[in-house]
Amino acid sequence: MSLNNMSNRLSDFGRQEDALTAIQDALSLYRALAAERPAAYNAHLAMSLNNISLRLSDLGSQEDALTAIQEALGLYRTLAAERPAAFNANLAGSLSDMSDDLADLGRHEEALTAIREALGLYRLLAAERPAVFNANLARSLCTLSYRLTDVGRQEEALTVMEEALSLNGEIENC
């Protein structure tokens, strides 16, 4: 976990190459551990794959980022099927990240599909725990608005953005 955290902090400080190296090290370790004990380490492996996807995206390696997030999603789908309360939020976050990667690659319809799936999960999570998940719901609505704009559906995008603002008033990072 420490290498994942180190990668995130290095990225926060703009040290993208160092952040990538740290997460590559974490990913190597978690791959080996998950091969031996998948029940104990697949969640860590999925998190590392999600983080390497973010680092690769930061460095402009969109295809590699997409490959990594797709692998993370495969793991999170399995984990969420077994324990939805524990992993639906991770699944939703990875779907949102995949939407970003797909949009960056110009695959707008696929990006729209991914963020819609994430939004569905965040709606369920926010209904159960609004104080915890309303901000995520608002951000996913914001992302949906951008994806709708990407495919020329401006009126729908505006309606979705209004819903996002009604949840949060101001949306950070939107």
Image (cartoon, rainbow, N blue to C red):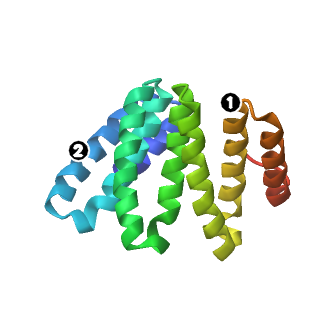
Residue 35 image label: none
Circles 2 and 1, Cβ within 8 Å, touching? The answer is no
- In the image, residue 137 sits, relative to residue 18, either above or below, namely below
Horizontal side, residue 32 vs residue 51: left or right: left
Q: Secondary structure at mark 2?
A: helix
- Residue 109 screen position, x and y as percent: 58, 35
Q: Residue at x 42, y 44 (%)?
A: 51
Which comes sooner in the sequence, label 2 or label 1?
Answer: 2
Q: Nearer the viewer, residue 29 or 161?
A: 161
Few, some or many residues within 10 Å of mark 2 (<14, 14–19, 20+):
few
Tell me which corner region of the image, top left, top right, bottom left or bottom right, holds residue 167. Answer: bottom right
> Which residue type carries mark 1?
Asp
- Residue 99 screen position, x and y as percent: 55, 40
Horizontal side, residue 114 vs residue 146: left or right: left
The residue that disc 1 covers is: 150
Q: Residue at x 22, y 63 (%)?
A: 38
Distance of label 2 from label 1 (alpha carbons): 36 Å
> Which residue type carries mark 2?
Ser
